[in-house]
Amino acid sequence: MAATTYQRVKRGPGWIVLAVVVVALMAYGVGRTDGRLSPAERVESISKRLACPVCDGESVFESRNTASNAIRNEIEVQVAGGVASDDEIITFIEQRYGGQVLLVPKAEGVDALVWILPVVAAVAGVTGLALVFRTWQRAGTGSVTDDDRALVERALRDERGARDDHDEPER
């Protein structure tokens, strides 16, 4: 027995909800950690967030430069001390080497523009598209004029005349 349109529409939201729940659970499972990080994992995590002060485009984790080794050693000492949080260690390294060692800019001051401008641009783009689509939709709903009707009648008459000329039998 074929499902009616009403039954298909009624089932649609259920599938959408199911898909959203599955995606959310998968994202949660992928992002979940088993608890606190080990000291080695903390050192790795912190060193991936810092740029090598000498190398161009490399993190402290990737670089084998002496400056990066010194920063990694400092991170290891502070992690082994167990007193400072990850953010405190990063702030300490930033104060010692300058703001250019941060791979991820802070969301404050002028650096906040790095985080805000893409969102503003996306919202402006979507808003602009919505306005353009609305304008196009309104422009397309104009009523038919007498000139339009006359043009269609003329085209139909010409089409019928051309068809009649081709339909005559040859003698």
Image (spheres, rainbow, N blue to C red):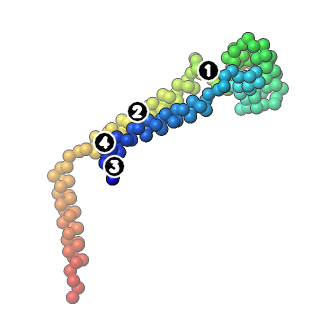
Q: How far apart, in angstroms, are the residues tagged by discs 2 and 1?
A: 28 Å
Q: How far apart, in angstroms, are the residues tagged by discs 2 and 4?
A: 15 Å
Type of the residue with mark 1 = Lys
Of labels 3 and 1, the one closer to you = 3
Tell me which residue sits at (71%, 32%) in the image: 57
Please, is residue 48 above or below residue 11 in the view? Answer: above
Q: Which residue is mark 4?
A: 137
- What residue occupies the far front of the structure in this picture? 1
Picture quarter containing residue 129?
Answer: top left
Q: Residue 2: x percent and y percent?
A: 33, 52
Q: Residues within 10 Å of mark 4 (few under 14, many from 20)?
A: few
Q: Residues within 10 Å of mark 2 (few under 14, many from 20)?
A: few
Q: Can residue 14 be seen here?
A: yes
- If you read the primary sequence from the N terminus, does the residue marked by circle 3 or circle 4 appear first? 3
- If you read the primary sequence from the N terminus, does the residue marked by circle 2 or circle 1 appear first? 1
Q: How far apart, in angstroms, are the residues tagged by discs 3 and 1?
A: 55 Å
Q: Which residue is mark 1?
A: 106
Q: How far apart, in angstroms, are the residues tagged by discs 3 and 4?
A: 33 Å
Q: Residue 167: x percent and y percent?
A: 22, 78
Of labels 3 and 2, the one closer to you = 3
